[in-house]
Amino acid sequence: MDPQTLPAEAQELYQRIRQQYRVGFESLKLEDNLQLHLLKITDIEQLLEGKDPLKNPSEFPFWVRLWEAAVVLSRFMVNLRPSPGTKVLELGAGLGAPGLTAAALGCAVTLTDYEDIILDFGRVSAAASKLDQVQFALLDWLDPPEMERYDIILGAEVLFRDEFFQPLLAVLRRALKPDGAVYLAHDMKRKSVHPFLQLAEKEYVVSASKRVLKSLDQEKEILLTRLTPR
């Protein structure tokens, strides 16, 4: 991806981000004619300073990585093939791969996260991927605004702090249509997933499946869950 091909507004945003971080584009090919170009930080190890996302989740900036769970959720959306115009919300979007995938499939997508800088990365990625109908919004789960309702809500690696379980469930109540579905994807090792799902079962029918993402040096087991209102 050549940054010089970005439209003017995205180019300006890209240059501003470059003043703060070392960045580059990572391509995520999902189909022959479906490829995303995701702007990400390239000096991630220096930024993380050895933090382990499984041991110290409260200290880890989850948005800086393209997580395996996000790739699995993106591929799931390709297979799900929602109808064009389906309203999709991504929570804790980070680099935004699942939401941008939905946008590439013709869905009306809103990406949300808690900091402007995260959304700025998403805006550049959307422009680089030639997706101009994506909406971006700040969303604090502890103080959510009045929200539209969506057919599908997505989240990859969003369950990492127990104190956010109830706020997340409150956001889902506000934002999901009665006949909608929530799709979540997480590393199987993440211990917070099952306690959250136990809480969610009071309000949702929960189904889960294991997906294996293969790479050159390892296999990652990802838990993909579907929540539908009771």
Image: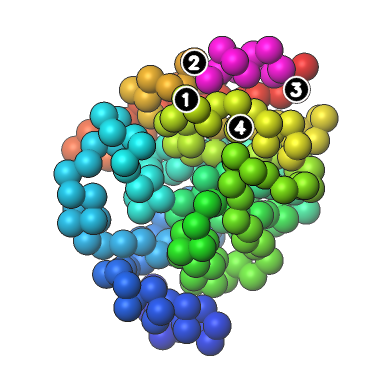
- Disc 3 marks a residue whose amino acid type is Pro
Residue under pointer 3: 229
**172 or 104: which is nearer to us?**
172
Per the image, label 3 sits on a secondary structure element best described as strand
Q: Nearer the N terminus, badge 1 or badge 2?
A: 1
According to the picture, the residue beneath numbered tag 2 turns out to be 195
Is mark 1 in CB contact (under 8 Å) with mark 2? yes
First reached walking from the N terminus: tag 2 or tag 3:
2
Question: Dot 1 corresponds to which residue?
Answer: 162
Given this view, does label 4 or label 2 mark the residue nearer the observer? 4
Front position among marks 1 and 2: 1
Q: Earlier in the sequence, mark 3 or mark 1?
A: 1
Taking the spot 17% from the left edge, 44% from the top edge, the residue there is 50
To which residue does mark 4 refer? 167
Percent of width and height locating residue 118: 47, 59
Q: Is residue 185 visible?
A: no
- Camera-nearest label, 3 or 1: 1
Residue 12 drawn at (x, y percent): 47, 84
Above or below 78: residue 95: below
Picture layout, residue 65 above or below residue 51: below
Q: Residue at x 37, y 25 (%)?
A: 190
| Callout 4 amino acid | Pro
- SS at mark 1 in the image: helix
| The image quarter in which residue 106 lies | bottom right
Residue 78, by quadrant, is top right
Disc 2 to disc 3, C-alpha distance: 18 Å
Q: Is residue 166 left or right of residue 46?
A: right
Q: Does 86 lie within the magenta span?
A: no
